[in-house]
Image (cartoon, rainbow, N blue to C red):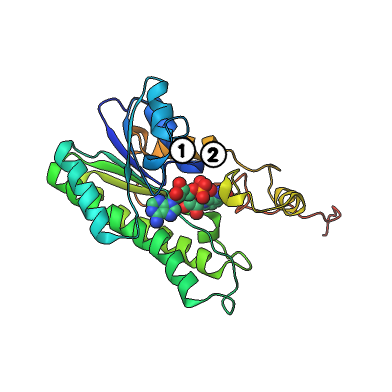
Amino acid sequence: MIDLSGKTALVTGGSRGIGRAVSMRLAEAGASVVILDRSDWSLPEDRSCSAAIRARGGRAESRELDVADSAQVDAVIGALAAERPIDILVNNAGVLHSGTTTETTDEVWRHQFAVNVDGTFFCTRAVIRTMLAADRGGKIVNISSISGLRANPGFAAYCASKAAIVNFTRQAGIDYAAQGINVNGVAPGFVETDMTSIYGPDIRAALEGQTPNGRWATPEQIADSVLFLASPLADHICGEVLAVDGGWLVGTPVVVPTASVS
Ligand SMILES: NC(=O)c1ccc[n+]([C@@H]2O[C@H](COP(=O)([O-])OP(=O)(O)OC[C@H]3O[C@@H](n4cnc5c(N)ncnc54)[C@H](O)[C@@H]3O)[C@@H](O)[C@H]2O)c1
């Protein structure tokens, strides 16, 4: 049983989808969760994730944050660190733009990188500074994607942004290992969230057909792996990115006649 009582965990983009499930899991494990998002802080009480956690007896609050705004990130995380030590950061906030290289405008490329890459960097830098000052280690989990570990046709900017997160995770993972700060990542496959609700039944069936276990993940299945990497069970894991994808990266099912050749 993972016990995170006494720990403070920040979850960016924690108001819905994977971030919401991560916030719930961390709170169930006893952490005090701070949801940093464009929206949760302004949602009505019956829809906000922090209110849902509190209604279940957990500890949570929400603060407004645009992760792409460096000054805002420093101000919000600095203010939080002045109140209590930060033990866990989950960089989950992300956006998805499709398009091949020639279809991708400057604006789309910049927005993709501003949220996914700059946001992950700004929050990681700010939190690691507070962790080093507190000298009590910590855990950072970055949400990449299978699209950061393999090319995905028609998603030039998204794939590039998620690949940047993979190597940033590896780099930070070794840079702060000696200080007891574990920086690791999760690379989800296809997950049932608002982000993937744009796919119709035909595309969904095709993607399930490419996945060895034949299913999409629930947000809770991704949250379980984040919980593991945010816990003391991951104390010896540094700069690793764990695929949680039903086997998609390992091998796509291909229907070929079985045969022996000798
Ligand atoms: N859903 C999938 O199949 C899938 C697969 C692989 C990786 N991912 C990644 O998982 C993460 C969560 O995805 P999701 O499916 O839950 O998406 P989602 O769209 O449901 O949620 C994204 C969250 O990020 C927040 N956000 C966006 N821009 C922000 C900003 N500038 N500042 C602060 N918060 C911001 C949104 O408000 C929202 O709460 C993303 O990084 C995504 O790329 C998702």
Residue drawn at x 42%, y 64% as measured from the top left = 164
Q: Which mark is residue 248?
A: none
| Crowd class of label 1 (few under 14; some 14 to 19; many from 20; radius 10 Å) | many
Query: Closest to the observer: 188 or 38?
Result: 38
> Does 148 sit left or right of 38 as displayed?
right
Q: Give the x, y percent position of residue 16.
A: 48, 41
> Does 82 sit left or right of 235 as displayed?
left
Q: Give the x, y percent position of residue 144.
A: 46, 54
Name the residue carrying label 1: 20
Q: Is mark 2 within 8 Å of ligand 1?
A: yes
> Does 204 sit left or right of 244 as displayed?
right
Q: Which element carries disc 1, helix, strand or loop? A: helix
Q: Is mark 1 within 8 Å of ligand 1?
A: yes
Q: For residue 73, which quarter of the picture?
A: bottom left
Residue drawn at x 18%, y 39% as measured from the top left = 136
Above/below status of 22 relative to 182: above
Q: For residue 155, which quarter of the picture?
A: bottom right
- Quarter of the image with the C terminus in it: bottom right
Residue 186 visible in the current orientation: no
Q: Give the x, y percent position of residue 51.
A: 40, 29
Q: Give the x, y percent position of residue 97.
A: 54, 63
* Mark 1 vs 2: CB contact within 8 A: yes
Q: Which mark is residue 219?
A: 2
| Crowd class of label 2 (few under 14; some 14 to 19; many from 20; radius 10 Å) | many
Query: Closest to the observer: 205 or 59?
Result: 59
Q: Residue furthest top?
A: 57
Query: Closest to the observer: 142 or 52?
Result: 52
- Quarter of the image with the N terminus in it: top left
